[in-house]
């Protein structure tokens, strides 16, 4: 049976096999996004009303939610397939395998990668987190994240992206692949120039590539940005990384096996 795939780590998209499914209108998209974030669980209609009309819902809000659900169900209807969107006495439920929703696939990849990393297998763990990074297609819930009910979730998913990036590049460094780590971190540093944990990783990656000057420059950019914007210095962890790079600390470079 052909499966649906739902993507929230960017604009909301739906695919049934290789066929894209379109929803007409932002209201339907908000309703479906809220339901997908709780896939497999019943969502009461009041939550959907609050998501669509956070301040002053109309008297017909519940009826309009019912109409939106009906239109979503029509869009997701496939001949010979069971209903994806189910109505229960308590509300509505998206009845799909949770891993068909990219948010839950992301969680699965992170957990599997953590298990591999804990077992001392950085290479396959890094491959899983690279796959996780590819799930992101831009800002989560693009076009819908102005809705208060989705804004906090979008922010959380964006923070998770940065955490996955940092863990992925840490594993690349552990697997002695500093060039790949440096490329990914340098691109992210343009977007997040004040994120100290990211800059510290970039410094280490550049140093392991034999580019001490680039590592020190990354620190200076962070230092200037923090002083100009907030009047503070980098935190102790980044300062310590800077000191060790200046001193050519041998512990910064992994030992290579003797041939």
Image: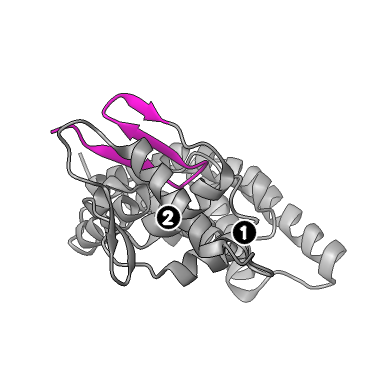
Q: Which mark is residue 147?
A: 1
In terms of depth relative to the viewer, which is nearer, 124 or 58?
A: 58
Residue carrying label 2: 164
Viewer-nearest residue: 178 or 152: 152
Q: Would you say 18 lies left or right of 160 here?
A: left
| Quarter of the rendering containing residue 26 | top right
136 lies left or right of 38: right
State the residue in front, 221 or 28.
28
Magenta residue span: 1-21
From the viewer's perspective, is the residue at label 1 or at label 2 nearer?
A: 1
User: Could you say where residue 237 lies in the image, as x and y percent from the top left?
Assistant: 58, 71
Q: CA distance from mark 1 to mark 2?
A: 25 Å
Circles 1, 2 touching at the beta carbon (< 8 Å): no
**Quadrant including the N terminus:** top left
Q: Can the viewer see residue 85 in this picture?
A: yes
Counting from the top left corner in percent of width and height, residue 257 is at: 24, 46
């Amino acid at each position: 049976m052909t499966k649906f795939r739902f993507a929230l780590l960017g604009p909301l998209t739906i695919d049934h096999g290789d066929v894209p499914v379109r929803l007409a209108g932002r209201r339907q998209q908000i309703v479906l996004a809220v339901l997908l974030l709780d896939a497999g669980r019943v969502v009461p209609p009041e939550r959907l009303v609050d998501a669509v009309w956070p301040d002053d819902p109309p008297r017909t809000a519940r009826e309009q939610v019912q109409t939106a659900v009906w239109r979503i169900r029509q869009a997701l209807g496939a001949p010979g397939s069971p209903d994806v969107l189910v109505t229960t006495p308590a509300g509505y439920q998206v009845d799909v395998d949770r891993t068909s929703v990219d948010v839950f696939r992301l969680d699965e990849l992170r957990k599997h990668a953590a298990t591999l990393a804990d077992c001392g297998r950085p290479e396959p763990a890094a491959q899983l987190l690279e796959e996780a990074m590819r799930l992101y297609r831009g800002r989560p819930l693009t076009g819908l994240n102005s809705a208060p009910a989705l804004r906090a979730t979008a922010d959380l998913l964006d923070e998770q992206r940065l955490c996955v990036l940092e863990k992925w590049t840490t594993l690349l460094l552990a697997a002695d692949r500093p060039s790949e780590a440096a490329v990914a971190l340098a691109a992210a540093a343009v977007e997040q120039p004040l994120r100290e944990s990211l800059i510290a990783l970039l410094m280490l990656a550049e140093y392991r590539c034999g580019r001490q000057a680039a590592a020190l420059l990354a620190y200076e950019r962070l230092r200037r940005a923090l002083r100009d914007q907030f009047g503070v210095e980098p935190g102790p962890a980044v300062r310590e990384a800077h000191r060790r790079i200046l001193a050519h600390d041998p512990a910064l470079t992994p030992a290579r096996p003797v041939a």
